[in-house]
Amino acid sequence: MNERITIHMDYVDGVSWTECSDDLPLCSQEYSLYPTSVLTSIPCKVITTDGRYCQAIYVVAESVALCNDGSHTRWAGWAEMSGDADDYSCVEKVLQGETLVVLRWHYPKGAQMPTQKGCEKMLEMQKYIDSAADFIDSHPKEWPLVREDGTVIAAGPAEIVGSGTEPVKRT
């Protein structure tokens, strides 16, 4: 039973790749707010559809002015950062529709940035925490803590009865 097991490590520079269809980098770098709101990601390492391995940024731009139908013009895509390229040339490429088709990407090693989906999850969690805090703040602190069977286990904020967590008196 000499089966050969091939393990494909999906890492480069010690960092795992992210499929573009699964998630995109967070655009946290503010480039412009008027007349077009432009945000870019930090430079990422990418693999394009033609098999090239290069450095690129993800750009999201939206016009501030409304179109005739009341919508905003929106641009989004990857732009390659060549050796002497600056953010402006990358933004200009995306606004002109000259985007890279990227299959996989990752932040540079050592960057601790969330992704777009990760940021959405953090925002949802923060909304939950804020609503729970608002609920607690809007209700009296004397509400009893009750078990599912109706037994009161706490009559006040610091009093827990029969839970095994009472302070131990030392003699």
Image: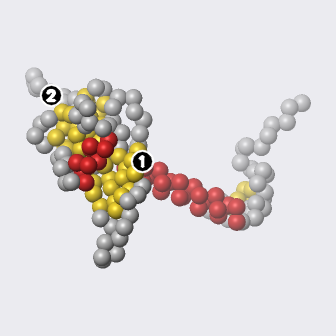
Tell me which residue sits at (78%, 62%) in the image.
Answer: 142
* Residue that sits furthest to the bottom in the current view: 69
| Quarter of the image with the C terminus in it | top right
Asked if residue 129 lies left or right of residue 80, the reply is right
Asked if residue 64 lies left or right of residue 92, the reply is right
The residue indicated by pointer 1 is: 30
| Quarter of the image with the N terminus in it | top left
The answer to whether residue 127 is seen in the rendering is: yes
The answer to whether residue 105 is seen in the rendering is: no
Q: Amino acid at mark 2?
A: Thr
Q: Nearer the viewer, residue 64 or 49?
A: 64
Tell me which residue sits at (19%, 37%) in the image.
Answer: 47
Q: Nearer the viewer, residue 116 or 7?
A: 116
Asked if residue 112 lies left or right of residue 7, the reply is right
The residue indicated by pointer 2 is: 6
Residue 58: image location, x then y, percent: 29, 46
Task: Check residue 138 in the rendering and tell me which mark sits there, or answer none.
Answer: none
Tell me which residue sits at (35%, 70%) in the image.
Answer: 66
Asked if residue 124 lies left or right of residue 59, the reply is right
Q: Secondary structure at mark 1?
A: strand
Residue 111: image location, x then y, percent: 40, 33
Number of the front mark, 1 or 2: 1
Q: Residues within 10 Å of mark 1 (few under 14, many from 20)?
A: few
In the figure, residue 104 lies in which quadrant? top left
Q: CA distance from mark 1 to mark 2?
A: 44 Å
Q: Amino acid at mark 1?
A: Glu
* Residue that sits furthest to the top in the current view: 2
Q: Residues within 10 Å of mark 2 (few under 14, many from 20)?
A: few
